[in-house]
Image (cartoon, helix red, strand yellow):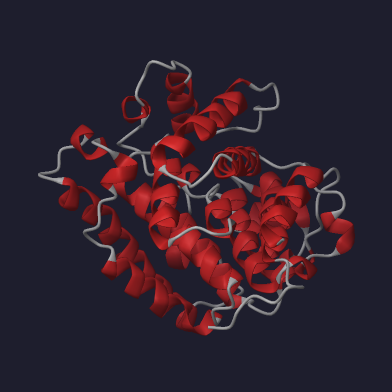
C-alpha cells in the first residue's frame, strides 16, 4: 500500500464524486435501463443535469460530516462525543425545508424519534432496516484524519445505527468507510476485494459495545456476537458475488443484475464498488454506468463517486461539473479540512 500524496486531495475528490454521482443518478432512480437510455441517450455520454441537484444522500453525508467535525473539534472521538452533534445534524436535516428529495422512510421515522432529546438513540433505531441510507452517507468516516481502526469502525457503525439498526446496515457501513479509507491511502484496486474479505472475516464476531451499547438487545439474537455476525455474513456473501462479477460481468450490462439493485446497504456497497472496479481508470464513465442502472441509481452512483474520488483525488472530476454541483462550497470546505 502506498501513502497518499500531498497533491491527491482524496477527501475533496471523494466528497465531490459522491455528490456528482448523486446528481447524475437522481433523474434515473426508479427507471428501467431502457427508460433511462430513452430519456438520457447513450449511457457513456450522460450529461450532468442542469442544475446539478443532489438528493438526501448528499444532504445526509454533509450532516454526518458536520457532526463528525464538531465532535472531533471537541477532543478525542468517542461514542458520547459523537452521538450528540451527529444526532443534532440528522434532526436538523429532517426538519429542513430542503429535505424534499424523496428521503427514505427509515431515516424519516428514526429522525422523528431522535427529536426527543430524552429518548435513547437505541430506542429510535429501526432495527429491522438495512436500507442503503445507512451507508450512502458514511464516506466522511473513512476520510477523517487521525482516527484509530477502532474509532473508525465504531463511528461508522454508530452513525448507521442512529437510523438503521439491522446488523447488516452496521457491517456494510463499516465496510464502506473502510473501502474509502483504503483507496484514499493508495490501496491497489485489484487487491481491494481480498482486503475487504479479510476485514469482514476478521471482524465477524466483533460487537463494538462501547459504541453501540445494548442495541443488540432490541433484536432477537442470543447475544451481541450472534447479532453482528448476521450482518457480516451477508456482507461476506455479497463480496463473494462481487469477486465473481468483476471477472464475468459485461460493462454493457446493468450492474444490478450481478450484485443487486442497491436498495439495501450491502447491495448498494457492492454495486457501487463494481461500477468503480469496472472502470478504475475512467471515473466519469464509472459514474455514468452507476447512474444508468435499474436499481437505486443515485445511491449506487454516489458510492461509486466516493470510491473513485478517494482513489484518484480531486482531479478525477471535470472542473465544469465540480463547479456547479449543489452544496459545492460545503463539500469543498470539508474536503479541504481532511486533505490538510
| Residue 240 seen | no
**Residue shown at the point (72%, 64%) measured from the top left:** 43
Is residue 51 rendered to the left or right of residue 115? right
Q: Is residue 30 above or below residue 200?
A: above
Q: Is residue 252 above or below residue 2?
A: above
Closer to the camera in the image, 248 or 115? 115
Q: Position of residue 207 (x, y in %)?
A: 25, 51
Q: Position of residue 139 (x, y in %)?
A: 56, 54
- Quadrant location of the C terminus in the rendered image: bottom right
Is residue 131 rendered to the left or right of residue 322? left
Q: Is residue 179 above or below residue 214?
A: below
Residue placed furthest toward the front = 75
Is residue 18 rendered to the left or right of residue 269? right
**Residue shown at the point (30%, 47%) measured from the top left:** 167
Q: Position of residue 304 (x, y in %)?
A: 60, 62
| Residue 67 seen | yes
Closer to the camera in the image, 68 or 241? 68
Q: Quarter of the image holding residue 69?
A: top right
Q: Position of residue 25 (x, y in %)?
A: 67, 51
**Residue shown at the point (23%, 36%) measured from the top left:** 214
Q: Quarter of the image holding residue 92?
A: top right
Q: How many marks?
A: 0
Residue placed furthest toward the right = 320
Amino acid at each position: 500500500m502506498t501513502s497518499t500524496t500531498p497533491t491527491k486531495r482524496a477527501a475533496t475528490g471523494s466528497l465531490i464524486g459522491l455528490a456528482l454521482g448523486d446528481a447524475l443518478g437522481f433523474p434515473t432512480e426508479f427507471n428501467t435501463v431502457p427508460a433511462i437510455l430513452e430519456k438520457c441517450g447513450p449511457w457513456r455520454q450522460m450529461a450532468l443535469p442542469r442544475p446539478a441537484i443532489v438528493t438526501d444522500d448528499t444532504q445526509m453525508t454533509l450532516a454526518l460530516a458536520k457532526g463528525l467535525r464538531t465532535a472531533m473539534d471537541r477532543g478525542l472521538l468517542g461514542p458520547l462525543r459523537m452521538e450528540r452533534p451527529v444526532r443534532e445534524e440528522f434532526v436538523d436535516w429532517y426538519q429542513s425545508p430542503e429535505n424534499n428529495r424523496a428521503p427514505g422512510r427509515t431515516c424519516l421515522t428514526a429522525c422523528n424519534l431522535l427529536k426527543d432529546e430524552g429518548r435513547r438513540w437505541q430506542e429510535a433505531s429501526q432495527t429491522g432496516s438495512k436500507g442503503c441510507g445507512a451507508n450512502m452517507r458514511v464516506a466522511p468516516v473513512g476520510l477523517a484524519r487521525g482516527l484509530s481502526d477502532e474509532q473508525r469502525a465504531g463511528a461508522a457503525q454508530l452513525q448507521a445505527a442512529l437510523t438503521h439498526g439491522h446488523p447488516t446496515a452496521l457491517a456494510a457501513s463499516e465496510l464502506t468507510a473502510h473501502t474509502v479509507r483504503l483507496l484514499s491511502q493508495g490501496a491497489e484496486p485489484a487487491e481491494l476485494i481480498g482486503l475487504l474479505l479479510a476485514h469482514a472475516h476478521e471482524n465477524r464476531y466483533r460487537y463494538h459495545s462501547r459504541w453501540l451499547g445494548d442495541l443488540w438487545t432490541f433484536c432477537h439474537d442470543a447475544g451481541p456476537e450472534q447479532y453482528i455476525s448476521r450482518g457480516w455474513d451477508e456482507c461476506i456473501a455479497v463480496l463473494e458475488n462481487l469477486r465473481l462479477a468483476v471477472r464475468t460481468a459485461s460493462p454493457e450490462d446493468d450492474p444490478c443484475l450481478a450484485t443487486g439493485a442497491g436498495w439495501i446497504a450491502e447491495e448498494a456497497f457492492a454495486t457501487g464498488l463494481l461500477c468503480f472496479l469496472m472502470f478504475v481508470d475512467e471515473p466519469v464513465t464509472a459514474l455514468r454506468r452507476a447512474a444508468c442502472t435499474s436499481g437505486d441509481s443515485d445511491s449506487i452512483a454516489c458510492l461509486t463517486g466516493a470510491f473513485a474520488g478517494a482513489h484518484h483525488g480531486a482531479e478525477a472530476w471535470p472542473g465544469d461539473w465540480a463547479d456547479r454541483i449543489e452544496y459545492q462550497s460545503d463539500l469543498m470546505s470539508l474536503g479541504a479540512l481532511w486533505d490538510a
